[in-house]
Image (cartoon, helix red, strand yellow):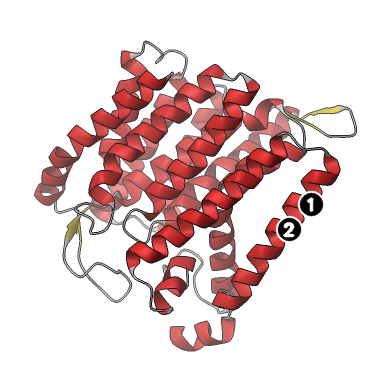
């Protein structure tokens, strides 16, 4: 099961320099502006290298038929991200593309089929599985997209979340989910060598949407499909930082009268930079928060109801304190800066 990770790592590591040159040729370059942190032009499209590493690992291991829906959906989402990086698609067109791709994946059999609860009984979702799965796929795709704002941030968060899901898959004996997760870890880790501060290349929407798609699909094929209601919290906690960051970004923009899909500098990593931290320091703080939430998620996997409630409530309490300290929801100041 380690081989897919090693193959994906080498594939993305060796492919990234070629993608870097391709990005310059195609003009897929992020130039400095008031919203971006980089101070010099940086090539994008790095997600192509991650995609290459993951897919090559699955194909060479002879597992492509097991993950047909994943490969098809991942390929389509990479194409959508590539078009966005090259032509800057309107938010409505991106969302439409994500909906269509998610529906294709659902038709290929990847969906949340039932939910059970800790008090007994099982709820088969039937047709409701389609909108619920659709919401989960699109949601996770966009939360990783939103957090991709600093060198190595989205890649590192994805690796930590993936390792958390991999540990749970190992505990549950979900072999294919574990293999898929480790392939994603390897592909992202190989690219992170070039993406960590100071970044030589960005992953772009090509990469952030692919990573979000993979995390969403891994959750569905593993934790969400076969476990109880409380362990639905495992992927949610594993992705806790980008989920809460995206949630507050949406609420902040909505209440301040700004378009939801318009980027800003009010995210967690921006607030950490405002405290005077360097990019590396800010990224490592986010990493540590993700590790903490990942450990809580693993703890929940073997906990009873009372222990689960304690872990969840204490985690939420710590996050609320952090949100207040960093003023992530200071709508008044945000509205003034927007005007």
Res. 48 image quadrant: top left
Residue at the outermost top position? 62
Left or right of residue 123, residue 325 in this image: left
Which residue is more in the foreground, 102 or 290? Answer: 290
Image quadrant occupied by the N terminus: top left
Residue 283, compared with residue 215, is above or below; it is below
Q: Which mark is residue 314?
A: 2
Cα–Cα gap, marks 2 and 1: 6 Å
Instruction: Return the residue nearer the eye: 277 or 211.
Output: 277
In the image, residue 314 lies at what x, y percent? 73, 58
Taking the image as shown, residue 21 lies to the left or right of residue 182, namely left
Is 146 situated above or below 56? below
Circle number at residue 310: 1
Name the residue: 84% across, 41% down: 305
**Residue 72 in which image quadrant:** top left
Quarter of the view holding residue 297: top right
Which residue is at 68% across, 57% downward? 315
Across and down, in percent, residue 104 comes to 49, 30
Could one spot residue 87 in this view of the protein?
A: yes
Residue 290: x percent and y percent? Answer: 53, 52
Q: Quadrant of the C terminus?
A: bottom left
Residue under the image location 73 percent in, 52 percent down = 312
Do the CB atoms of the residues marked 2 and 1 lie less than 8 Å apart?
Answer: yes
């Amino acid at each position: 099961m380690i081989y897919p990770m090693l193959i994906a790592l080498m594939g993305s590591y060796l492919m990234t320099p070629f993608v870097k040159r391709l990005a310059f040729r195609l003009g897929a370059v992020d130039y400095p502006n008031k919203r971006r942190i980089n101070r010099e032009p940086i090539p994008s499209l790095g997600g192509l290298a991650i995609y290459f590493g993951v897919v090559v690992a699955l194909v060479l291991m002879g597992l492509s038929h097991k993950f047909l829906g994943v490969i098809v959906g991942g390929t389509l989402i990479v194409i959508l991200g590539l078009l966005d990086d090259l032509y800057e698609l309107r938010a409505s067109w991106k969302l439409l593309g994500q909906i269509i791709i998610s529906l294709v994946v659902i038709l290929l059999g990847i969906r949340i089929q039932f939910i059970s609860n800790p008090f007994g009984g099982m709820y088969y979702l039937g047709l409701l599985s389609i909108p619920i799965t659709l919401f989960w796929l699109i949601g996770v795709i966009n939360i990783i997209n939103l957090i991709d704002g600093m060198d190595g941030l989205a890649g590192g968060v994805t690796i930590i979340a993936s390792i958390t899901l991999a540990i749970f898959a190992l505990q549950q004996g979900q072999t294919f989910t574990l293999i898929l997760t480790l392939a994603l870890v390897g592909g992202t880790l190989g690219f992170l060598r070039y993406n960590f501060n100071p970044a030589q290349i960005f992953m772009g929407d090509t990469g952030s949407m692919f990573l979000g798609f993979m995390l969403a699909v891994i959750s569905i094929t593993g934790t969400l499909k076969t476990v109880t209601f409380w362990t639905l919290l495992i992927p949610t906690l594993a992705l806790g930082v980008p989920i809460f960051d995206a949630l507050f970004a949406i609420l902040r923009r909505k209440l301040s009268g700004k378009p939801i899909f318009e980027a800003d500098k009010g995210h967690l990593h921006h607030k950490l930079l405002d405290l005077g931290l360097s990019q590396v320091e800010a990224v490592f703080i986010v990493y540590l928060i993700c590790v903490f939430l990942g450990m809580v998620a693993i703890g929940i996997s073997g906990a009873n109801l009372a222990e689960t409630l304690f872990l969840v409530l204490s985690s939420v309490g710590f996050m609320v304190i952090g949100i207040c300290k960093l003023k992530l929801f200071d709508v008044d100041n945000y509205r003034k800066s927007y005007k």
